[in-house]
Image (cartoon, helix red, strand yellow):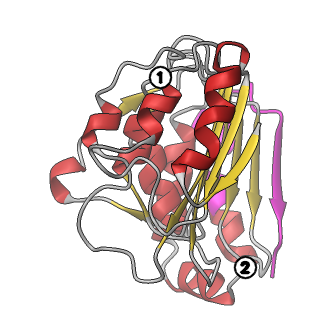
Amino acid sequence: MHLTFSDIEEIEPLIVASAEHLRSLDLRPAQGYPPLSSQDSPILPLLDQCSSLRHLKFRIATQSQPPSVGSLIHETAVSHSYNFQSTLTILDICSVQKRTLSATTLDYSILHFASLFPELLVLHVCGQGFRIDELENTQTFTFPSLLRIDLQLYDVESTTQVLEQMEMPRLRLLLMHLGDSTEVAERVNRDPIIILALALQIKRFGTTLQTVKLRSKSGLYWNSLDSFLALLSPRFYGFSSVLRSFHVLGSR
């Protein structure tokens, strides 16, 4: 069920009527606020009525000038016990800014929310980078069943930071979109440690990971890629032979 709305009352009757048998729900609030950012979010009680949900997608539509404090998902939502906690297998969270449709910076609450669902198999996270406070830097989240993760965070550092906070003992497929700006390639070329730090995080999942796809429309310099791929080499660095394919879409 795909629902775009400006007022929660517009979708409440639709969800209530089909909640028991609802398997897929795509929430896209037209208003400029994250759907689960407040303690009294009206979406939370609606989600509580969905007992068999398998696929949840919601767009975080923030204002063009997002607040500098506060989490995108309120602590009430990340400490809640959902009726579909054991049935959800696909979670898709995308942040966009109202009017400009550009992405908004994500924070650790996204990972905290996603980690509530132990049967999650697929996770897609899209946003303009990733913000984390020093106090949260050591916090990690476990995804015991996750097989596939798709990170569209548009910079290397944010992608590294997210992977660093995740434990995924069954991960098979890793997709990363590093953005389409040439600035990414230039920065990585100047400071190769940036891309090597990402390789080290990928290497953590070497015993199960089968496919890695790295997308950057503007590309990366070949010398950056050479160092990156060398660190993932099974011959020299002990990366598991389970890894069957590595795709880099874009090179300079």
Dot 2 amino acid type: Asp
Any magenta on residue 229? yes
Q: Mark 1 points at which residue?
A: 48
SS for tag 1? loop
SS for tag 2? loop
Instruction: Report the mark closest to the observer, 1 or 2.
Output: 1
Dot 1 amino acid type: Asp
Please give left or right for residue 223 compared with residue 83 in the image: right
Q: In x, y percent, where is residue 244? A: 83, 33
> Badge 2, how many Cα within 10 Å: few under 14, some, many 20+?
some
Residue interval drawn in magenta: 228-252
Q: Which quarter of the image is occupied by the C terminus?
A: bottom right
Whether residue 43 can be seen here: yes
Q: Name the residue under label 2.
A: 180
Q: In x, y percent, where is residue 112? A: 37, 37
Please give left or right for residue 104 compared with residue 126 in the image: left
